[in-house]
Image (spheres, rainbow, N blue to C red):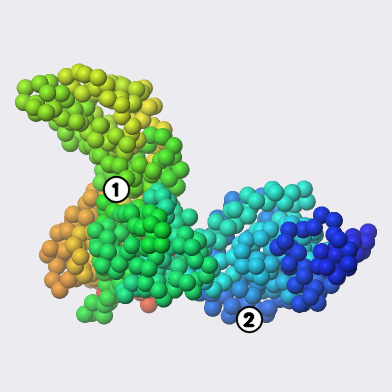
């Protein structure tokens, strides 16, 4: 039976390729027909035989992976996300090099044996010349996304597979490889693969975009789209531009947007030939705010785009002691607190990534948002980022601190007033903050402190989408998105009668909890961002001891306290380097210091049985000793030590501070 099927399949392949003299019934798509012609005419393959791909040796495979460099890490991260999206449906996710060699794969455990037998193993060569028409090899040959469904495969033995492959291009247009999702499901139709193909194509696009951003750190990266809310997202276009204004790299989306058929039409040409941008404009825009979006025009036909720019990265300098310094310039101006977008805020911290993902999905669906977090945790920063990511980005973001305005003034500030509404009112009246936010975003900070009587008026605004100023008059329609923020437990305030229950449910479409600074996984980057923000363009660095101290501190005042500390330290420091002496005593000093003696390797330096007050049990002594031994074993390399101890660098720094461990210990 199997041989009869193989013979029938071989006849169909021959008829489609034009070798049998017969007109085929139900011909495959043109992409598949071209592939079959290549397999027969160029490669001399036999569709009826049972092939198994050539497999590289372990050393050859290792060399290939090493040549791919950081692309391997980017691809593995994106593969894991893609596999999660289609997990449980019998899929394999595969990444190949430009020659079709599988460099990495992920399988559903239920289908391991099936994929292994088919030859889906690391090092296997899946180009058309080796195994005929298939998702990976045909995608490489066509250099565009392809679906190879069941008997579209050249060889009959691959008829149980359905493959969706998308090409990945480097910043100069060369093929990096293919991302492929292959299924062994038997009941799927070709049409049902379109969803999978869309997911694979998006993931391949992300890998290419991330590669461009990584390889073009020395250039300006202009990110643009026809809609402002899509700048910084998957479908944006990117151009890497050098200091002379020449285009050095481009994403595939940029080619399509600018009407170019290949990278040669863009690379090496002035960016001004395509868009209304100059090096001076890019510099000026990034100095103002790297994530501000502004309008640019296409030179050829005047189409309008919206753009943002990432400035070149400046490498960290070394202090006079030879230690690597944390440079404010390296962090660039995108670290400014009022200029951070969702991508910058969520990079490196899982909780913030979750918040950004949820916020991005609901921001344009008229879902009110409540941000909960400790005082100073950056709730307004996050709210501004949500506003910039929304389709209201071109309208106003109006922030109101409900705890910062006197109760006697908050009503007039929020709702405005007519002439003569009260003694001392302006002759022309006042518009009010709610109307100022019309078409944009109203941010109500510390909403839990809003006086109860005003909560009723706000509820009416939310329910009726109109506002009546003090002194009466015709209600004025208002269109706004409300983001509220609080450090309090609003449900508790509702139970205590201090916050209206109906208003709470009107404002609480979704609650996003922002982590405290001490809980952030990206604390190192947060310090760099704050340093860049407070240095006012100066090249300020932090020496290693001061940086370790900042990492170990608990930051009860969160981001706001961090910025104040760095602002003061920058003013006090000498030679552009922040040192321990420039930091406040509250940050530098540990909670308790030993009265006498200093531990070294777990033994009191005085030779007496002096105990550290913070080490009040044997487990802490053992932990300190283990950390010391591991530090010495790794020659005081903190990253390697943290990895060996299976803890983050931030946690290790805190433990070192707690136990007063330093390189002089």
At 68% from the left and 55% from the top, the residue drawn is: 91
| Residue 63 falls left or right of residue 16 | left
Report x, y in % for residue 438: 29, 34
Report x, y in % for residue 181: 65, 58
| Residue 164 falls left or right of residue 636 | right
Of 159 and 147, nearer the camera is: 147
Q: Which label was assigned to residue 95?
A: none
At 69% from the left and 58% from the top, the residue drawn is: 147
At 45% from the left and 67% from the top, the residue drawn is: 250
Would residue 230 be visible to someone looking at this image? yes
Where is the N terminus found, in terms of image quarters? Answer: bottom right
Instruction: Give the residue number, with chain letter if any, for mark 2.
Output: 60
Give the SS element for disc 2: helix
- Residue farthest along the left direction in this orientation: 424
Q: Quick check: 432 above or below 152? A: above
Tell which tag, 1 or 2, sits nearer the viewer. 1
| Residue 29 falls left or right of residue 447 | right
Picture quadrant where residue 133 is located: bottom right
User: Which label's residue is closer to the chain start, 1 or 2?
Assistant: 2
Would residue 595 be visible to someone looking at this image? no
Of 45 and 659, nearer the camera is: 45
Instruction: Give the residue number, with chain letter if any, for mark 1.
Output: 381
Of 617 and 440, nearer the camera is: 440
At 73% from the left and 68% from the top, the residue drawn is: 35
Give the SS element for disc 1: helix
Q: Quick check: 549 above or below 374? A: below
């Amino acid at each position: 039976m199997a041989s009869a099927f193989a013979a029938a399949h071989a006849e169909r392949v021959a008829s489609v390729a034009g070798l049998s003299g017969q007109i085929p019934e139900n011909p495959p798509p043109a992409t598949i027909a071209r592939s079959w012609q290549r397999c027969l005419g160029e490669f001399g393959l036999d569709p009826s035989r049972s092939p198994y791909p050539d497999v590289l040796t372990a050393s050859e495979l290792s060399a290939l992976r090493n040549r791919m460099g950081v692309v391997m890490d980017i691809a593995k991260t994106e593969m894991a996300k893609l596999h999660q999206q289609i997990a449980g449906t019998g899929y394999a996710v595969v990444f190949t090099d430009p020659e079709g060699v599988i460099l990495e794969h992920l399988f559903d455990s239920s289908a391991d044996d099936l994929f292994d037998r088919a030859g889906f193993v690391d090092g296997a060569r899946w180009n058309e010349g080796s195994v005929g028409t298939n998702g990976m090899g045909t995608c490489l040959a066509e250099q565009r996304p392809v679906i190879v469904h069941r008997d579209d495969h050249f060889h009959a033995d691959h008829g149980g597979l359905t493959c969706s492959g998308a090409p990945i291009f480097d910043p100069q247009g060369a093929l990096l490889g293919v991302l492929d999702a292959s299924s062994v499901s038997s009941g799927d139709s070709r049409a049902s693969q379109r969803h999978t193909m869309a997911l694979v194509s998006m993931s391949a696009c992300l890998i290419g975009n991330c590669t461009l951003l990584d390889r073009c750190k020395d250039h300006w990266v202009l990110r643009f789209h026809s809609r402002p809310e899509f700048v910084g997202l998957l479908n944006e276009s990117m151009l890497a531009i050098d200091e002379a204004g020449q285009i050095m790299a481009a994403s595939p989306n940029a080619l399509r947007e600018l009407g170019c058929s290949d990278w040669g039409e863009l690379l090496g040409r002035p960016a001004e030939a395509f868009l209304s941008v100059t090096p001076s404009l890019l510099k000026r825009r990034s100095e103002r705010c790297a994530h501000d979006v502004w309008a640019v025009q296409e030179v050829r036909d005047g189409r309008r785009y919206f753009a943002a720019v990432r400035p070149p990265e400046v490498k960290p300098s070394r202090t006079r002691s030879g230690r690597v310094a944390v440079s404010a310039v390296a962090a660039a101006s995108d670290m400014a607190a009022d200029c951070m977008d969702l991508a910058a805020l969520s990079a490196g911290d899982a909780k913030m990534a979750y918040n950004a993902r949820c916020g991005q999905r609901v921001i344009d669906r008229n879902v009110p948002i409540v941000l909960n977090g400790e005082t100073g945790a950056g709730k307004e920063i996050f709210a501004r980022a949500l506003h910039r990511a929304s389709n209201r980005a071109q309208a106003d973001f109006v922030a109101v601190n409900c705890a910062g305005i006197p109760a006697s003034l908050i009503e007039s500030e929020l709702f405005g007033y007519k002439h003569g509404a009260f003694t001392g009112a302006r002759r022309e009246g006042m518009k009010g903050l709610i109307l100022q936010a019309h078409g944009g975003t109203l941010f109500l900070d510390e909403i839990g402190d809003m006086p109860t009587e005003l909560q009723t008026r706000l509820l009416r605004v939310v329910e009726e989408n109109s506002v009546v100023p003090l002194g009466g008059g015709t209600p004025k329609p208002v269109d706004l998105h409300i983001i509220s923020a609080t450090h309090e437990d609003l449900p508790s305030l509702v139970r205590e009668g201090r916050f209206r229950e109906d208003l709470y449910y009107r404002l609480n479409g979704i609650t996003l909890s922002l982590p405290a600074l001490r809980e952030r996984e990206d604390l190192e980057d947060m310090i760099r961002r704050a340093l860049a923000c407070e240095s006012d363009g100066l090249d300020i660095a932090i020496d290693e001891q001061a940086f370790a101290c900042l990492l170990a501190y608990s930051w009860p005042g969160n981001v706001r306290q961090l910025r104040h500390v760095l602002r003061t330290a920058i003013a006090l420091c000498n030679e552009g380097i922040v040192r321990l002496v420039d930091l406040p005593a509250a940050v530098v000093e540990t909670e308790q210091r030993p009265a006498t003696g200093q531990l070294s390797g777990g033994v009191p330096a005085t030779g007496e049985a002096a105990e550290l007050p913070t080490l009040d049990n044997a487990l802490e002594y053992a932990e300190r000793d283990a950390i010391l031994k591991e530090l010495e074993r790794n020659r005081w390399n903190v990253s390697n030590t943290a990895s060996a101890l299976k803890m983050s660098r931030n946690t290790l720094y805190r433990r070192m501070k707690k136990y007063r461990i330093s390189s002089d210990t």
